[in-house]
Amino acid sequence: MRGRKLFKYASPFLMLLFMILRVIPIFLVRGIFSLVRYVPGMFGLGLRYVLLKRLSKSCGENVAIFEGVFT
């Protein structure tokens, strides 16, 4: 399973994690983002997506934040 289909199945878990991150201060979320910057695979991709969604004003569903990204 890849891409959009995987995102569709993982979306409820990602949104739950996003809701949890909304209560964490931004400076801590930035620190977490720097820690997961190099986490490989789909797990890392999902973590970076949720963290970027929390840090940005808006973030669509068709976004991939690969390893080593700097924002």
Image (cartoon, grey):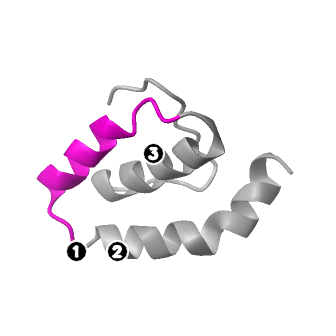
Residue 15 placement (x, y as % from top left):
50, 71
Identify the secondary structure beneath mark 1.
loop
Residue type at numbered disc 3: Arg
In the rendering, which numbered label is found on residue 23? Answer: 1
Give the side of residue 44 with respect to residue 30, left or right: right
Alpha carbon distance from label 2 to label 3 = 15 Å
Alpha carbon distance from label 3 to label 1 = 17 Å
Alpha carbon distance from label 1 to label 2 = 6 Å
**Which sits in the foreground, 64 or 60?**
64
Residue at horizontal 29 percent and vertical 36 percent from the top: 34
Region rendered in magenta: 23-39
Asked if marks 2 and 3 touch (Cβ < 8 Å), the reply is no
Q: Is residue 29 magenta?
A: yes
Judging by the rendered image, the residue that carries numbered circle 2 is 20
Residue type at numbered disc 2: Ile
Residue 48 placement (x, y as % from top left):
45, 45
Examine the rendered structure and indicate whether residue 48 appears above or below residue 34.
below
Which mark is first along the chain, 1 or 3? 1
Identify the secondary structure beneath mark 3.
helix
In the rendering, which numbered label is found on residue 7? Answer: none
Which mark is first along the chain, 3 or 2? 2
Residue at horizontal 58 percent and vertical 48 percent from the top: 43
Asked if marks 1 and 2 touch (Cβ < 8 Å), the reply is yes
Judging by the rendered image, the residue that carries numbered circle 3 is 48
Give the side of residue 53 with respect to residue 1, left or right: left
Q: Quadrant of residue 50?
A: bottom left
Identify the secondary structure beneath mark 2.
helix
